[in-house]
Amino acid sequence: MKYRSVLFVPGHEEKKIKKAYTLDADLVVIDLESTVPDDEKQNARQIIKNCKVDKNKTYIRINNIGDLDFVVKEEFIGIFLPFTESRKQLLNIDKILKSNEKLKTDIIPIIESEKGIENLREICEFEERIKVISFGSHDLAKSINLKVSDDENEILNYRKLIVSHSKNPIDTSYLNFKDLIGFEKSCNLAKSIGFAGKACIHPGQVDISNKIF
């Protein structure tokens, strides 16, 4: 399984959700986590339902275990799991999903902490639900007080670790969405290492990511 472009959109912003499906993103991820304010998270679920999204190309980035009920009830095909850090964590989610789901829910782990990096092998070996993993450099860098320069050299070794354990992984997002030249350079670097696609946070990034990957 390969995703060239993975477009993240906030779950509480209806216009952005609808816009996402007019683009050529390989996968749309509707976010219930960091881009959604706490007082909007419940409302976000209703907005997602009202948008009648294409569930065949949509994952949900969950905020907590409670979001699994929403994912299962609405029959989304998968979740992005923030701060994936251990096999035990995955087994717990697997148990919850099995007790409720009508169709099998895939998991794409986001590796964005040192603990996740340390347990990368056991996470990737959870093949029952995991086909692809993704890298989240920003929270990782923040947690270890790592300042990442424009050439992203500081996260190079972390990227190489991800690639060494996973087939067709998804690279971290590029936060300066106005800098499309920088985004393109980041895509080219990620591809040269072995990534198969990239997280996108703006519509303008999607075609570039598709072209490069």
Image (cartoon, rainbow, N blue to C red):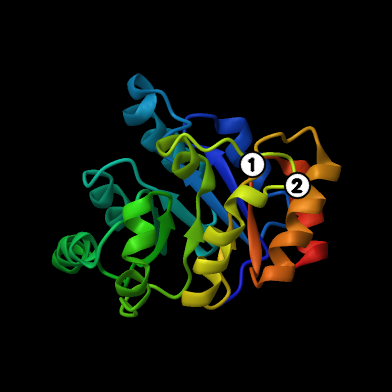
At 71% from the left and 34% from the top, the residue drawn is: 176
Viewer-closest of 148 and 101? 148
Q: Is 132 on the left or on the right of 92, as rendered?
A: right
Picture layout, residue 187 above or below residue 34: below
The Cα–Cα distance between marks 2 and 1, rounded to whole angstroms, is: 7 Å
Residue type, label 2: Gln
Picture layout, residue 46 above or below residue 38: below
Q: Quadrant of the N terminus?
A: bottom right
Q: Which residue is mark 1?
A: 201
Dot 2: within a 10 Å radius of its alpha carbon, few (fewer than 14), some, or many (20 or more) residues? many
Helix or strand or loop: what does disc 2 sit on?
helix
Viewer-closest of 44 and 95? 95
Q: Is 97 on the left or on the right of 154, as rendered?
A: left
Q: Which mark is residue 83?
A: none
At 61% from the left and 47% from the top, the residue drawn is: 173
Q: Which mark is residue 205?
A: 2
At 62% from the left and 67% from the top, the residue drawn is: 3
> Residue 207 in the image: x percent, y percent?
80, 54
Viewer-closest of 133 and 148? 148
Hey, which quadrant is residue 43 in on the image? Answer: top left
Residue type, label 1: Ile
